[in-house]
């Protein structure tokens, strides 16, 4: 396995529906079931190493192996899954934890979902929202 010295971040536009267009071979066969169950479409992936023809990708707490053909390199997000943050919500300062990072195509930047008061937010948070 070849270690990647500087982690790169990618958006990988592949979902179970893409199998008919790009084939299931884009995902390592041992990882296909867990990929389909977690369905990380739209998420950002940190590439942690290469394993043969596959990249080993971290998405939140999970890892997957996928071929690099559909990847689009993006800038490293300012925050990571698990980071503690503070935001203003309904006029109050709230503490939260980042639980998911996704990519916004039109803005060309990451957005985040937080766990606040034990519940996952449905609101998208941007880097500019963090206090």
Image (tube, rainbow, N blue to C red):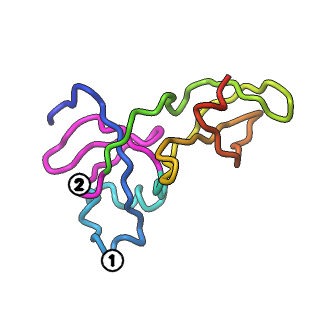
Label 1 sits on a secondary structure element that is: helix
| Image quarter hosting the N terminus | top left
Q: Nearer the viewer, residue 44 or 116?
A: 44
Quadrant housing residue 51: top left
Label tally? 2
Q: Which residue is nearer to you in this view: 36 or 22?
A: 22
Q: Which residue matches tag 1?
A: 20
In the drawing, does residue 80 fall left or right of residue 49?
right
The residue at the point 43 percent across, 62 percent down is 36
Residue at 33% x, 55% y: name it: 31
Q: Is residue 77 above or below residue 52?
A: above
* Relative depth, front residue between 19 and 130: 130
Residue 57, above or below 69: above
Identify the residue shown where x is 70% and y is 44%. Answer: 121
The image shows residue 83, relative to residue 34, as above or below, that is above
- Contact, CB < 8 Å: mark 1 with mark 2? no
Left or right of 44? Residue 94 is right
| Label 2 sits on residue | 67
What secondary structure is marked by label 2?
loop
Residue 124 image position (x, y, % from top left): 65, 45
Magenta span covers which residues? 43-71
Image side of residue 11 versus residue 94, left or right: left
N-terminal of the pair, mark 1 or mark 2, is 1
Q: Residues within 10 Å of mark 2 (few under 14, many from 20)?
A: some
Task: Tell me if residue 86 is in the magenta stretch.
Answer: no
């Amino acid at each position: 396995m070849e270690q990647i010295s500087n982690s790169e971040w990618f958006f990988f536009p592949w979902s179970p529906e893409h199998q008919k267009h790009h084939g299931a071979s884009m995902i390592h066969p041992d990882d296909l079931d867990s990929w389909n169950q977690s369905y990380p479409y739209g998420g950002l992936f940190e590439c942690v190493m290469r394993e043969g023809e596959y990249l080993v990708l971290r998405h939140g707490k999970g890892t997957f192996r996928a071929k690099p053909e559909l990847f689009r390199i993006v800038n490293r997000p300012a925050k990571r899954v698990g980071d503690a943050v503070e935001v203003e919500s309904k006029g109050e300062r709230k503490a939260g934890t980042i639980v998911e990072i996704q990519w916004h195509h039109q803005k060309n930047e990451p957005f985040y979902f937080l766990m606040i008061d034990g519940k996952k937010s449905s609101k998208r948070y941007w880097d500019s929202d963090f206090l």
